[in-house]
Image (cartoon, rainbow, N blue to C red):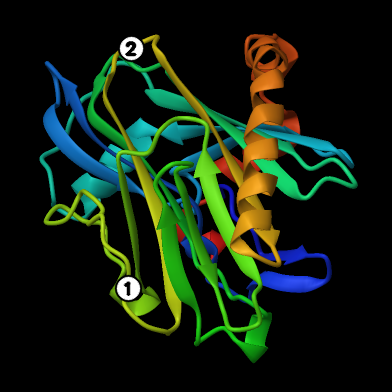
Amino acid sequence: MGFSIKELTYKGKYLIYLSEQELTGPWFSFTLEGEKIGSIPIILKNIEPTPIYNMVNTRAGTALSRITLDFNITEYLKKLVQEKKIHPIPLVKKQFVRVYKDIFNPPKVPYISTFFTMKNISDFALKDFSMYFVFDFDINGLEGYDNDLSGYDEENDIIYQYDDTGLYGGISPISKSTNYESCLTKDFKIDQSKMNLSNTLYKGRGEILSALQIEFMTLEPDHTFQTALVISGGFSKEELIENIKEGKNDAMKHLHQVNRSVKSEPRNLQEEAFTKINLQQAEDCK
């Protein structure tokens, strides 16, 4: 359960095709801190099985889709206890971080913009909070997935991939990235020994992915982190940059609409249909 892009095309040409789901979406890392739990480092991929991610509700439309889910801290800690990575922790109440995703995909525009709003509704602080955008582009699909090149436009904060046909695919957030990286897909790693992207690009062609990182320091209880990511393509670097700049300008216009939605009562109501699904164990969701 989470957010990923299975396929993405630009004017009929594949930018993403048959990529692993966990390599086409947002990751998070932070240290969970509280008097009762101490300090517990956490890394979340965009796709985590229930009950780690609990679906709250969802709305799908032709131009706008909304997903609301919870990172279930209680279940995550229970999993760590079962794996004997931490000692049992008695919690008086269940603890969550709520994640809102607003996906704008209107027809006849050359980009997709997705807002990510995280609200810490737990009693714990999220220290050293980072959000990563990880995208395994397959420029021209199976015809050219393993001969991509990569680049980073520092002025516009756009990381991109392309091939010899001149087709480009790239991403950029409305919040300034703190780190970037492209590397062979098989070599990509975020773990306790490597929490920050390297600010380097893979030299040469290959089966590569691109990633951006935003560091936010600390997300205290009842505080919110929000950003939006724009994804686009182009038949030249210049076209890609213009498309993403247009997408970021458009995304800024939707900020008020998104903030009004995440604060609304219907957006935060648990849908009955998801209650049973959220109780399933991880092995039931493979």
Q: Residue at 12% across / 43% down in the picture?
A: 86
Left-right relation of 145 to 84: right
**Callout 2 touching callout 1 (CB < 8 Å):** no
Dot 1 lies on which element? loop
- Return the x and y of residue 78 as percentages of the image width and height: 28, 41
Which amino acid type corresponds to the residue marked 2 in the rendered image? Pro
Which residue is labeled 1 in the image? 202
Residue 221's mark?
Answer: 2
- Return the x and y of residue 269 as percentages of the image width and height: 68, 18
Location of residue 90 with respect to 231 vertically, above or below: above
Location of residue 164 with respect to 79 vertically, above or below: below
- Packing grade of label 1 (10 A; few <14, some 14-19, many >=20) is some
Quarter of the figure with residue 233:
bottom right
Left-right relation of 109 to 67: right
Q: Residue at 41% across / 25% down in the picture?
A: 96
- Work out whether residue 119 or residue 114 is closer to the camera in this orientation and state it: 114
Q: Residue at 69% across / 61% down in the picture?
A: 234
Q: Residue at 35% across / 44% down in the picture?
A: 213
Q: Is residue 239 visible?
A: yes
Quarter of the figure with residue 215:
top left
